[in-house]
Structures are given as structure tokens and as C-alpha cells.
Image (spheres, rainbow, N blue to C red):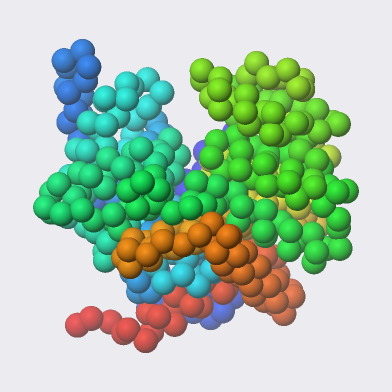
Amino acid sequence: MVKYNPWDMACHQLDIVAEKISLDQGIHAKLRSCKRALIVSIPIRMDDGSVHVFEGYRVQHNLERGPAKGGIRYHPNVSLDEVKALAMWMTWKCAVVGIPYGGAKGGIICDPSKMSIAEIERLTRRYTSEISIIIGPEKDIPAPDVNTNPQIMSWIMDTYSMNIGYSAPGVVTGKPIEIGGSQGRLTATGRGVMFVVEEALKHLKILPKNCSVAVQGFGNVGSATARFLHELGCKVVAVTDVSGGLFNKNGLNIPELLEYVKTSPRKVIAGYKGGDFESNCKKANEELLALGVDILAPCALENQITKENASKVKAKIIAEGANGPTTPEADEILYQKGVFVLPDVLTNAGGVTVSYFEWIQDLQSHFWQLEDIDKELKRIMTNSFKDVVKISEKEKCNMRLAAYILAVSRVAHAVKLRGVFP
């Protein structure tokens, strides 16, 4: 399979939009660059007494519309180019849903599955100290991403607070509720995917009860997406995760599967008896992406649907729960096939939207009820879908280009208003 550079891919997507909207060359050049990128070495004493030096990153793409916002991922394949691309995508995501943030992202090259909890805590606290020169409630607010969770956000918040001498819950989002977290944050991305899919089905005049769904990835985003689409009335017939794939043409019992994963030692779908299991992850994902389902929800990592496999996709709708799961070449193939692609910068923006709610609650020390959060999330996701569809129909383009036209136009307008310093 061709190896895609995510930063090249992100810049290529921007270039397409820039040409489409005749973007000012100076603004285009500025948006094609990240404002700052911090590379840090993280020496950690491991449990066996040895010292291992990890490499970490924090990248801020653009701050024109507000402080930086973006998750932190722990993964062996983290790279500076990946983090830069994810930071750019965060800029567009915040702009699509009208949230006053710029885009950022962070990551550490590591394999947390081979580390103890104590090692991960030391890694997190040292990384936080190293990047504390550019993060803060008014500057850059991290959040969970791949292989990070509320506990890791707690350590970040505590470390930052210890360094400045007082508690600063607004420095991160995705925290436990007990220390300033928000109701609904853990499942916000998946719930947002469901709201966008619900609007897409209305737009296409398809009933949820007539829809079959395949979900790639069964982590935080994928499992919540499966849960909420199941509750909407859709039939989830396949899911994959790091252990393999589960298939059941009659529909998986999602509540039962969620409970199984929650209580299993490895927190994976392997061993669940409610479907046919494929232990070869590559084969399972290839089969899932080519299933004849109504909705395909890629909720794993980037570059999953490429020019090599896009022609095999049979789904009517692709709902991108992951960041950058579809390459530009695949986009064109899917568009020609008539697949309705719901792009990541719109579809998975539920997480950053509720993160924004959490940040507001922390700054005001006033916390909202879950029903208020869900109601406001639905309003934002629904209106954003309608905004993107309107542009798609007017410009006769696919939904990704429409979402990018909306996002880049909003950011470019902010750049123009603020001007060039000095």
C-alpha cells in the first residue's frame, strides 16, 4: 500500500480550496504554514530503573480565531508531519462549526500498550512540563486523542497547576467531571457523528431503520458511534478494532458488545460470541471497508480509504469519525461513484464542540446539565451540516470541498481582519 504523508495531504486539500475560492496568495501561504511547532525530548525513568528518552510534539497551526485547541495522541507512528496535519484539520474543524478556536495537536512517539500506568504517568507529567511554555487556558487547550483518556488529562491539569501554583482546570478538556470535566464529553464525538448522519439520512430521504452500518475502530469514537447509530434505529453489522473484526449480517447486539468490551481484560472485541470473528486485522478491515452497507463509519486512523481500495467501497454514505481517513485521490473516486461522504472536519466535530462547552464551564465555574449540552450540540451539528450542504449544492461540489470552502473562508476572513504584524 502507498504510504501517504498526512501533511502533504492536508496542504493538497487546502490548495484545492484556495484555487476554488481564489484565495489571496498571502493568506494561502500563511494558512499553508503552522504558526509554531515545538519538539521536546522526554527522558523517563522506566520501572526497571533504565532511562528512556521519548520524543514529543505540540503544534499550533493557526490562532487567528482564538486560542489553539487539539488533542494529544500516544502512538508508535506519531510524527511531526502527522501532528502538523492534524493541527491544520483542527483549524478547519473549529471553523466549520463556528467555535472560536484555532487548530493545534500534540503527540508522543510511544507504545502505551507496552508501558505500565506509572510509566505513562511519568511520561505525561514530563511532557506537560516541557510543553507548558505554550499551553494554557488562554493560549492552547489540549484534549484526549488516540490512546489518551480522562486520567491522562487529569495528570496534565495537575502538572500544569503545580507549575503555576494554583488549579487551572481550563488548561485541558476531556477531564473527569470531579475536577472540572463536562457531562457528555466522553461520548461527544460519537454523538456528533450520529447527529450529522441523522441529518444526512433526512437529506437523502432514507429511514434509519432501513440502514445497515459498518464501523471501523471500536475505541472511544467508534464505540460511541456504534452505540448512537444503534439507538437511532440503524443495524450495525460489522465492527473492527486492534484485535480483528466482528461480522453479523443480522446485526450485532451493540449494548451487549459494549458491555463485553468494557469488562474484558484487553478492552477489545475479540472473544465476543455474537458474530463471526476475523482475527487478521488487515483482512478484517479490508472486508469491512468493502461491505455492501448503507453507512460506513471509519473511526480509526487516517489514510484508510485510498485510491487502491476506494473503488471497492459499496456504502452509500461514509461518515468520517476519524481524522483524515480518506485520501484526496479516494475522494474523487468516491464522488464519481456517487458516495455521499460526510467529511471529518464536520462529522467528528462533536468532540471539540463539547470540549468548548467544558472550557466555558471551567472559566465560569458554572456547569451545565447533560440535556442542555446534548441540545446545544445537536443545534450546532445540525446547523453546520445544513451550512455545508447549502454550499455543496450551490458550488456543485462534494461535501468535503464544501466544508473546506466554509472553514477556509471563515479563517481567511479572520486573517484579513487582523492583518499582518508588524
Q: Say which quarter of the image contains residue 159.
A: top left
Which residue is rendered at x = 68% and y = 47% of the image? 228
Mark count: 0
Quarter of the figure that contains the N terminus: top right
Front residue of this view, candidates 386 and 355: 355
* Left or right: 37, with 231 as reference point: left
Front residue of this view, candidates 82 and 184: 184
Residue 396, compared with residue 68, is above or below; it is below
Front residue of this view, candidates 97 and 356: 356
Quarter of the figure that contains the C terminus: bottom left
* Left or right: 139, with 315 as reference point: left
* Left or right: 80, with 305 as reference point: left
Residue 123, compared with residue 19, is above or below; it is above
Q: Specify whether residue 100 is in view.
A: yes
* Left or right: 281, with 364 as reference point: right
The residue positioned farthest toward the top in the image shown: 48
Which residue is rendered at x = 70% and y = 76% of the image? 390
Q: Specify whether residue 8 is in view.
A: no
Which residue is rendered at x = 61% and y = 52% of the image? 191
Q: Position of residue 198 (x, y in %)?
A: 74, 58
Q: Say which quarter of the image contains residue 416.
A: bottom left
Q: Position of residue 258 (x, y in %)?
A: 63, 31
Residue 69, compared with residue 314, is above or below; it is below
Which residue is rendered at x = 80% and y = 28% of the image? 248
